[in-house]
Image: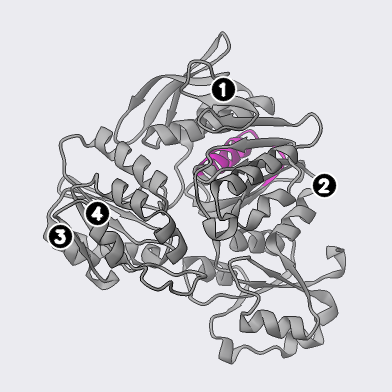
Amino acid sequence: MNLNLINSIFFLGIGGIGMSGLARYFMMKKYEVFGYDREPSSITDDLEKNGAVICHDIKSFDMNYFYKNKDKTIVIYTPAVSENHPLFKKFKSHNFKIYKRAQIIEHISKDSRCIAIAGTHGKTTTSSILAHILHEANISFCALVGGIMENYNSNFLFKGNEYFLIEADEFDRSFLKLRPEFACITSIDNDHMDIYENSDNLNEAFKNFENNLIDGGFLISNDGVDIGGEKYGFESNSKYKVINTEYKSGFSQFDIQIDDNIFKNFKIKLPGEHNVLNCLAAVILALKLGIPESIILNAISTFKGVKRRFSYVINSKKIILIDDYAHHPEEISKIHKSLRIIYPNDKILAIFQPHLFSRTINLIDDFANELSKFDNVILLEIYPAREEPIGGVSSSLLLEKIRLDNKTICQKSEISHSILNTGNKINVLMGAGDIANEVELIKQEILKCNT
């Protein structure tokens, strides 16, 4: 693959968080960027404002430009897009060069010192914190992360080529294309069983990721996972451990102990012990890269977070609305635990949009157990993403298993009314589907009724 011979790139699924970051990379490199995504979004709108040409209607898609420029065009697709997709089949039938996103990441990362953040949960926040530290330390680096960093309103940062920081995605085993020098594994919980079938296969993939470290590479792993690397966490036998934690509504404060050394007064504007662990992992890697403690401390204090990661949409005396990407039972558990610590005396309403039919049925009892810990639950219909429906699998099936009296299903258009009608002060929106597109409207409708 010689990208110097290419001048235009077509992204199939350009609105995805991983694909859009890669599109930004190539736009920065002055390539012509085109793409298709089924639905317009704030991400596709922003890409278009910066010069990308994006189509949302297959029927109106014009291939003529690409036919004329075929030798200088490549197609990049996300594995979430089926090879039976009409545009994929059209490009393939005309012999375009087609690559998975992971193949392109492998290619563009090989000439830099790769830092890879892996894990079924926590990798987006961890990689975003580390990217902010690198930025504040004026390090030469490129970062592609799986969320929109509030400090930069982007999932892409570029300040040079010495380091390549990437969120290493386990879906479709994409992360096995990487050869990192520095790596982190934040967690390993059953997910993507449509790919892995069972936990043994998932664990094997993470062990293969560990084995992909270059000779002399540095790996840290959460003390809750059964895998190699130097351990970090809350456990007393971890090499890197958090001590003296304090949680407030707007921040977490803690110290870090490394052997006999204690680094004091870390303060980050994120709640919850899971975010403290994400911060710890980023700090460890930053120290390993030789960044001074003073710069790290300052960067942590100025990190604003990642959109849809415990994001306060409304924070008033009357009502609090939080938006989060949580789409796995373990993530829901962490959200609930954080909310109970911060708001011990308030009732909490959870509004959850299940993501994928396969994930819902594979983890349905776990979902039900975690959602039953809230005071009220509202479910939306399952967001299918890349999947076709599975017979008998629905939000109604999940609702039956939730052990609450105060539970219901509603449409997206009814969310704000349902929140107001329930009457709880604390409300959290959760899901990885198109519930994200409703957040601003929900905010405006609630504020209109509470002013």
Tag of residue 420: 3
User: What is the distance, in whole Å, between disc 4 and disc 3 at their CAs?
Assistant: 22 Å
Q: Which three-letter amino acid code belongs to the residue tagged 1?
A: Ser
Residue at the spot x=44%, y=57% of the render?
A: 362
Badge 1 marks a residue whose secondary structure is helix
Q: Nearer the viewer, mark 1 or mark 3?
A: 3
Q: Which residues are magenta?
A: 125-142
User: What is the distance, in whole Å, between disc 2 and disc 1 at their CAs?
Assistant: 30 Å
What residue is disc 4 on? 402
Q: Which three-letter amino acid code belongs to the residue tagged 4?
A: Ile
Q: Which three-letter amino acid code belongs to the residue tagged 3?
A: Leu
- Residue 226, by quadrant, is top right
**Viewer-closest of 361 and 255:** 361
Callout 2 crowding tier (Cα within 10 Å): few <14, some 14–19, many ≥20: few
Q: Residue furthest top?
A: 260
User: What is the distance, in whole Å, between disc 1 and disc 3 at their CAs?
Assistant: 45 Å
Q: Is residue 441 above or below residue 430?
A: below
Badge 2 marks a residue whose secondary structure is loop
**Circle nearer the N terminus (1, 3):** 1
User: What is the distance, in whole Å, between disc 1 and disc 4 at their CAs?
Assistant: 47 Å
**Circle nearer the N terminus (2, 1):** 2
Q: Main secondary structure of the magenta part?
A: helix
What residue is disc 1 on? 294
Tag of residue 111: 2
Q: At which x and y percent is residue 328?
A: 42, 51
Callout 4 crowding tier (Cα within 10 Å): few <14, some 14–19, many ≥20: many
